[in-house]
Amino acid sequence: MLRFIRPALFLVFSLLVARGAEPLAERFSFIAMGCMPYGAQNYAAYERLLAEISRQRPSFTVHCGDTKSGSEPPTDAFYQQVKTWFDSIEGPVIYTPGDNEWTDVNRVNNGAQDPLVWLAKVRRLYFAEERSLGRAPMPLVTQRREKGFEKFVENARWTRGGVVFATVHVVGSNNNHQPEIPGAVEEFRERDAANAAWVRATFAEARATNAPAVALFFQAEPLNHLDAALKKGRESGFTQFLATVESEARVFAKPVLLVHADEHRYRLEIGVRLKAGGEKLANVTRLETFGANDIHAVFVTVDPQAPQVFLAGPLIVPGNALPNLPNPRAAAAAKK
């Protein structure tokens, strides 16, 4: 019997090759981190993390912004050191800015500097070319190609195993929707429109290529902040971003992973509510990185053939202090 089955299998394989069918995508992994190193006292631990990432050899690494704390003054020398750290990692490194790098430099303890000056510096230093950082840079598609959004060079997109990945420049401090700061709201409005367009373009790419999943990376924790803004009667800087993600994720109807930093704690939440009072979307998962003094990362295995596509968990660095993990029972009790 086998002698008849084998020729038949060979015939099927030959037909698939003749029709140009692509081989099944293999599993791969990526690592995400954010809100670190946060001060010289953490540099040694941060460098141990970078060495561990290189040892793990993921397909790529993403830093979700906030390379310094909000109380640290920005300096050109430190931002260059951050780039040097990124370029020390084996493989590609993709970075999306956080609020501490530019939005919050107007604070008195930061010398009350101009956020737009530092935003321009961030764009020049880290996003001069359409490629990642790291010891083995990879090409990226960035929003500079889109008419009307050429200045948003930091919004990037790439594909691996058919899965579409993108960074979106969404930051804390209410996404810079801060009426009390001159020029902030105007900057927010322009970038918010660009971000919405970039999210739509990312999902359009995913639909056009029949991608099995989409992953978005950004700095801010927008969900709790949206609720807080509404309770205070303020306009949230995350409304349009979340509404765009929700509408696109509904139409896409396949796994969507949102990876962000901001609150300095590991969190994995399957089924996410993207608007106040809305229903949870079963196909959307939120993954939050460690940060501040918890110098660890998150490790994500991507299986394009699996129904859930993404399998995530902590990457604990040997030699670094163990992180404080959230207590699920306490969190559940707090919501009651």
Image: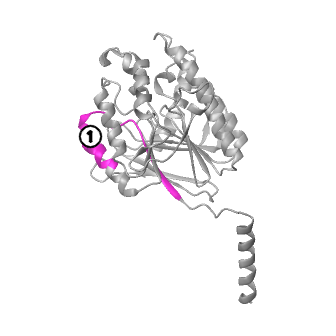
Asked where in the image residue 32 lies, by quadrant, the reply is top left
Q: How many numbered circles are shown? A: 1
- Residue topped by disc 1: 43
Locate residue 140 relative to residue 327 in the image: left or right.
Answer: right
Specify the color scheme: one colour
Give residue 8's position: percent from left, percent from top.
75, 80
Residue drawn at (70%, 43%) of the image: 252
Please tell me whether residue 135 is drawn above or below residue 8 in the rendered image. above
Q: Which residues are magenta?
A: 28-50
Task: Give the position of the N terminus as an image quadrant.
Answer: bottom right
Give residue 279's position: percent from left, percent from top.
67, 36
Residue drawn at (39%, 57%) of the image: 56
Q: Is residue 275 within the magenta segment?
A: no
Q: Is residue 35 within the magenta segment?
A: yes
Give residue 66's position: percent from left, percent from top.
40, 32
Task: Give the position of the C terminus as an image quadrant.
Answer: top right
Residue drawn at (66%, 43%) of the image: 205
Mark 1: few/some/many CA within 10 Å (<14, 14-19, 20+):
some
Residue 141 shows in the view: yes
Residue drawn at (54%, 60%) of the image: 27
Please tell me whether residue 150 is drawn above or below residue 22 in the rendered image. above
Asked where in the image residue 45 lies, by quadrant, the reply is top left
Amino acid of disc 1 = Tyr
Depth check: give the residue in front, 222 or 10: 10
SS of the residue under disc 1 = helix
Give residue 160's position: percent from left, percent from top.
56, 52
Residue 236 shows in the view: no
